[in-house]
Amino acid sequence: MTAQTVQSVIFYLLVVLVVGSSAIVVFAQNIVHAVFALFVTLLAVAGFYAMLGADFLAVTQVVVYVGGILALLLFGILLTSRMPIILGLITRRTYFLATLVGLMVFAILTTVIIQADWLRGQIQMQPKPTIEPLGELLLGRYLFPFEFASLTLLVALIGAAYLVRRGGR
């Protein structure tokens, strides 16, 4: 088996995982099942980033979304509800509107894919690591905006904690 064949098999496996698990997210009646399917979807998207050579995006996807956001969702769901939440607010009108919007998005994406001028042939370039140049930019040229954003987020977090604690008294 050649390297190109292995990459193709991995790519199509990731496609099946993303499409299948995202369909489960959309159609699951139990919100906990939807969150676990979202876990698989986000991991497979990180696999796409890794295949593209975007190592920083792949690691960020896993750490922020899979590690942080999904853990927050699961804790929020499991700690706030006394019984499993059943998503029973779906009517025929909801399915009709969702199908209509989905078909419109599919038509737009199909049109863009068909009309795009795609590169033909193989690109023989090996992807380079992206973390080193990003680190040099963040700690060099963009140090002040990076630190300003982090301090702004810290102040917002302290303010939110103060408001929550003050409301509990």
Image: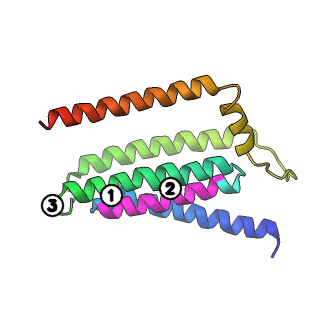
Counting residues from the start of the chain, the first of labels 3 and 2 encountered is: 2
Marks 2 and 3: in contact by CB < 8 Å? no
**Left or right relative to 111: residue 78:** left
What residue is pinned by disc 3?
82
Give the x, y percent position of residue 144: 60, 23
- Residue occupying the point 63% across, 55% down: 48
Residue in view at x 52 percent, y 24 percent: 148
Residue 119: tell me if it is visible: yes
Tag 2: Cα neighbours inside 10 Å, few (<14), some, or many (≥20)? many
- 7 in relation to 118, above or below: below
Q: Depth check: give the residue in front, 131 or 11.
A: 131
Spatial CA distance of label 2 from label 1 is: 15 Å
Residue farthest right in this picture: 124
Q: Nearer the viewer, residue 26 or 44?
A: 44
Q: In this view, does 3 lie above or below 119?
A: below
* Quadrant placement of the N terminus: bottom right
Can you identify the residue that label 1 sits on?
74
Instruction: Report the magenta residues as a range.
Output: 32-49
Q: Which amino acid does label 3 sit on?
A: Arg
Sequence-wise first label, 2 or 1: 2
Q: Which amino acid does label 2 sit on?
A: Leu
Amino acid identity at mark 1? Leu
Q: Where is residue 127 in the image (x, y as percent from the top left)?
A: 79, 50
> Where's the C terminus, which quadrant?
top left
